[in-house]
Amino acid sequence: MIRVAIVDDKATNRRIVSEKLAENKCFQIVIAAVDGADFLHQMTVIEPENHPHIVLMDLEMPHVNGITAIATASSLYPQLRFVVLTIFDDEEKIFNAIKAGACGYLLKEESSTVIADMLINLWESGAGPISPSIAYKILQMVQGQTASGLRKAETGADIFQLSAREKEILEWLSQGYEYKDIGSKLFISPNTVKKHCISIYQKLHVNSRAQALRIAYTKGLI
Amino acid sequence: MIRVAIVDDKATNRRIVSEKLAENKCFQIVIAAVDGADFLHQMTVIEPENHPHIVLMDLEMPHVNGITAIATASSLYPQLRFVVLTIFDDEEKIFNAIKAGACGYLLKEESSTVIADMLINLWESGAGPISPSIAYKILQMVQGQTASGLRKAETGADIFQLSAREKEILEWLSQGYEYKDIGSKLFISPNTVKKHCISIYQKLHVNSRAQALRIAYTKGLI
DNA sequence: GTTTAAATCATCCAAATGGAGTATTGTTTT
DNA sequence: AAAACAATACTCCATTTGGATGATTTAAAC
């Protein structure tokens, strides 16, 4: 029997989740709390042998939000497994919840069987349950291609007053194409492409492709 | 119709995957390659309008392994989506594959319907397909509780197995210096610098400085 | 209406680059 | 001891690049 705590400020949500889990007889709801403060308090009054194994935590709650509650409770009760169960899937919240100590992150839109299966799997194998779309966002965090890692193309390119055509050609240059390739793509002579390149180098105050690409990459021109 | 490439050194595996996808009429296998080098070569001879949308990549292959192939190809063909399809689930490989540019990571044990569903979802919504147990390992990386997640600093350049000297020369190249400049700085012949450069290009599977620098910048080698 | 700027294309030339070899010298690894 | 690898260096060759210079056309700016 897996003991589960539900933390959500909406009574309707708590009831829906309870009913979803009730379809499977191996779950037992031992705590239903309205926010983080309520959950932490109930944990202090319940006997340790009746502590929940898994805590389903909503994020948007009054008084003490889910992130804070996870961060606090995971320190006080390291044996608890915290699963975020929410409708929010923005990177900020995902990242903070994970850093706070959540071992899983499920969207409320998941079907009851999926949620039940994943919680049972968490219980049996220890693998945290994660909704596919959340998993992909986490992957992107590891990849570093989001939020912190992305650069805005508009700001950098205009300092050097490159014309639209020059920006276009710089883009192709960065892809590794040579004069005649770019000429074919744009239906112009390779000589013209070369002319544009030299103009670009002059505006960037360099005299080789590698130097131009260095500026392009480091200043966010491409 | 989703065009798919399969890269696996075992003919049996390629056939099994083909048959799994053949159950769903919306997939079309456009490339079947035996290793990374084979795949990269086939990409150069196929017309761009027939390029695959999704590349299913095994990791353990002779000549050019999957990680290197993804790192190279994702720079050369940014529009491709790379999905690792393998039996391995150790953190080292997951981490390297993600850093190399994979957008998904599926275990071969997944059923054909699950694989098909996730690839279709990738096609329709852009969300990378990730097996649940893999997703949890990625989450742990973000949490910073695992070994391979912690030493992320060194990994970038090591995917391509560049020697220390080659990394050094790649660094100078990115600064915009030419053979003779670098030779003077390192007290070696420009001929030797050139030799190193060509070795670097071979390891990166490119054939120009601009292409090498693109990979270097986008994969964090410099 | 003239000026200015951008985009187009060309020719000539010197330098740099990419590629295929061959070869020597040290380390490692086996 | 042999094999593999890394770093060094060279030659020969075709291609690419950077630069200078001149020219035409079109569109926007004054």
Image (spheres, coloured by chain):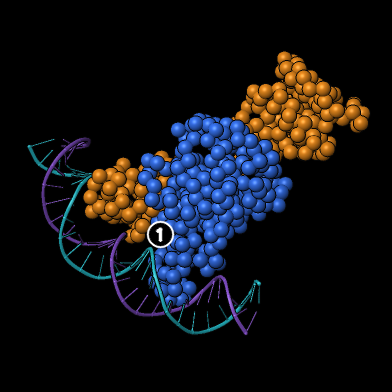
Chain colours: A orange, B blue, C cyan, D purple
What residue is rendered at 38% in x and 53% in y? A176
Question: In the image, A31: left or right of A108?
Answer: right
The number of discs equals 1
Query: Which quadrant of the figure contains the N terminus of chain A?
Result: top right
Question: In front here: B16 or B103?
Answer: B16
Q: Is residue A169 above or below residue A27?
A: below
Image x and y of residue A217, in percent = 44, 50
- Chain holding disc 1: B
- The residue wearing badge 1 is B207
User: Observer-nearest residue: B49 or A15?
Assistant: B49
Q: Is residue A61 visible?
A: no
The relative height of residue B52 versus residue A61 in the rendered view (above or below) is: below
Q: Name the spot of residue D5 as percent of width and height, x first.
A: 56, 70
Residue B110 appears in the figure: yes
Residue drawn at 79 percent across, 36 percent down: A124
Q: With respect to residue B39, does C22 lie above or below?
A: below
Residue A99 lies, in percent from the top left, at 70, 40
Percent position of residue B28, x then y? 47, 37
Left or right: where A72 falls relative to A217: right
